[in-house]
Image (cartoon, rainbow, N blue to C red):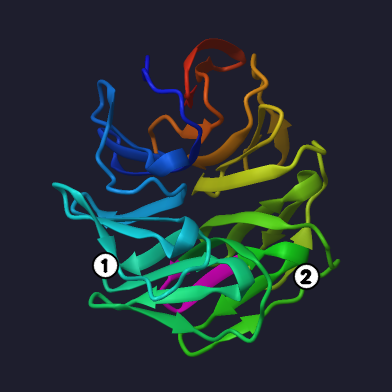
Amino acid sequence: MESGFSLGLKGIWGASATDIYAVGDAGTILKYNGTRWSAMDSGTTETLYGVWGSSATDAYAVGASGTILKYNGTRWSAMDSGSSKMLFGVWGSSATNVYAVGESGTIIKYDGTRWSAVDIGSSKMLFGVWGSSATDVYAVGESGTIMKYDGTRWTAIAVQNPVTATLQSVSGSSENDIYAVGSSGTVLHYNGTQWDTMNKISSAPLKGVFSISDKETYAVGREATVLRYNGEQWSVMKSCSQVHFEGIWGLPGEKPYAVGDAGEIILQHNSSPTISGIILLLLK
């Protein structure tokens, strides 16, 4: 799976196994059609940190200087975010309910027509956003910050054993099974009642987490770290490179992908990886 590109990648999302998008440095957007990766014209040189879509014809990429791009199935075009803040994460429950989060407690919401600022009463940096529905949305960030939207307002959430780690990413399989990961190998889990810290099996900073099901969750990070949770325990997946991973995404029954620093794609089958480019493909 040779990509032919060398710029660092920050985020990844797909509409299907044959329609996947990766974003990163200098406005980089790559598309995978099931056979090969190709560069797309983003129209910007700003670094893009996150990407998400509701369908193959409705996707969003967010990044530096308040940059938000929208993909209509044919091309990417700039949107007016109304913000100049760094935007690190994006997620939505539908094409008319999308959230982007970023520096200084920035949360902006898209209603299908325009983006508007949301006051959450916090100035903490926010790096990740995910929800199980339109009335169950979480944003995570610095100093262990977890914010929850219940359909009416955003509130700060307490962790059973408070952490000060910077939380970089959040994902789950349901409203009762949610993970947040961050600095120093921190992993938090929400069981529908409370957030708890999980036992660490790595001290490497974790940058991305993605739940495919309640028995298949992946976390990736610095120092080529790839962790897998099977519903009972976390395990370390071997890697043959020191690439720093930034994000991960996958589909049920399909192979998950992780993106990171420039230089390689790692194809990993069980515990025997081989190298070939910029994207990590975990072959199950």
- Taking the image as drawn, is residue 21 in sight? yes
The three-letter amino acid code for the residue at tag 1 is Ala
Who is closer to the viewer here, 245 or 18?
Answer: 245
Tell me, for residue 227, which label it has, or none.
none
Residue bearing the label numbered 1:
95
Magenta stretch encompasses residue 121: no
Residue bearing the label numbered 2:
159
Q: Residue at x 53, y 41 (%)?
A: 247
- Pointer 1 and pointer 2: residues touching (CB < 8 Å)? no
User: Does 213 sit left or right of 183 as displayed?
Assistant: left
Magenta segment, which residues?
A: 132-139
Q: Residue at x 82, y 38 (%)?
A: 203
In the depicted structure, whether residue 41 falls above or below residue 110: above
In the depicted structure, whether residue 229 falls above or below residue 111: above
Q: Residue at x 78, y 70 (%)?
A: 159
Is label 2 in a helix, a strand or a loop? loop
The three-letter amino acid code for the residue at tag 2 is Val
Q: Residue at x 79, y 57 (%)?
A: 165
Is label 1 in a helix, a strand or a loop? loop
Q: Position of residue 31 (x, y in %)?
A: 29, 34
